[in-house]
Image (cartoon, grey):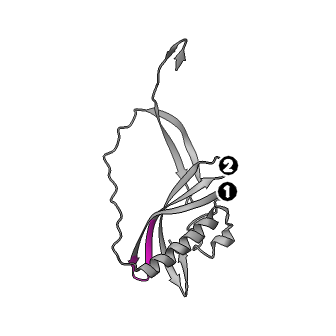
Amino acid sequence: ITEGENTKTVHSAYIVSVYVDSTGNMVLIKNPTITSIPKKSDYKPKAIESEGTVDSITTNEINEFLTTFFKLYPTATASELSYYVNDGILKPIGKEYIFQELVNPIYNRKDNQVTVSLTVEYIDQQTKATQVSQFDLVLEKNGSNWKIIE
């Protein structure tokens, strides 16, 4: 807040109630309500580590699949996504993002599936900002093709 030559910073916090339906659509159901400023949580997420259950050949195949997929993903239609992803797992986003890289992918085999935890880096064409998204996926190989099933 600036009054004349005096400037001071004011911090406020609000609670917002949001309804999320079964398809992930959201709507505010209550106006923002002022509340006390929350304290920082001491939560520390468990770090995901590779268990060494995926061999280098499979790792290279998955890297190639994910690189191809995430290059196409920002502009892909629902029918294009269906070649790579089971219905509804990842929705079309319709943005002009330029794929940069897969960051720290971690692969672990679980039966005939591979769990993947990774970060994907894009450049947003409109804002020129780096856009970073985290994904936890389950892949399954069908013949010679990989597919995101969860």
Q: Amino acid type of disc 2?
A: Gln
> Is residue 68 positioned above or below 97 on the image?
below
- Residue 76, image x, y percentages: 67, 66
Magenta segment main secondary structure:
strand
Relative height, residue 10 to residue 140 (above, below): above
Residue at image coords 53%, 62%: 101
Most extreme residue toward the bottom is 143
Residue 113 drawn in magenta: yes
Q: Position of residue 98 (x, y in %)?
A: 63, 58
Q: Is residue 150 magenta?
A: no
Residue located at (51% from left, 72% from top): 63
Residue 126 is marked as 2
Horizontal and vertical percent position of residue 42: 30, 46
When the figure is inspected, residue 50 is found, relative to residue 143, above or below; the finding is above
Do callouts 2 and 1 mark residues in contact (Cβ within 8 Å)? yes
Answer with left or right where residue 13 lies relative to residue 24. Answer: left
Q: Which mark is residue 96?
A: 1
Identify the element where label 1 is drawn: loop
Q: Quadrant of residue 143?
A: bottom right
Span shown in magenta:
109-117
Q: Is residue 23 visible?
A: no
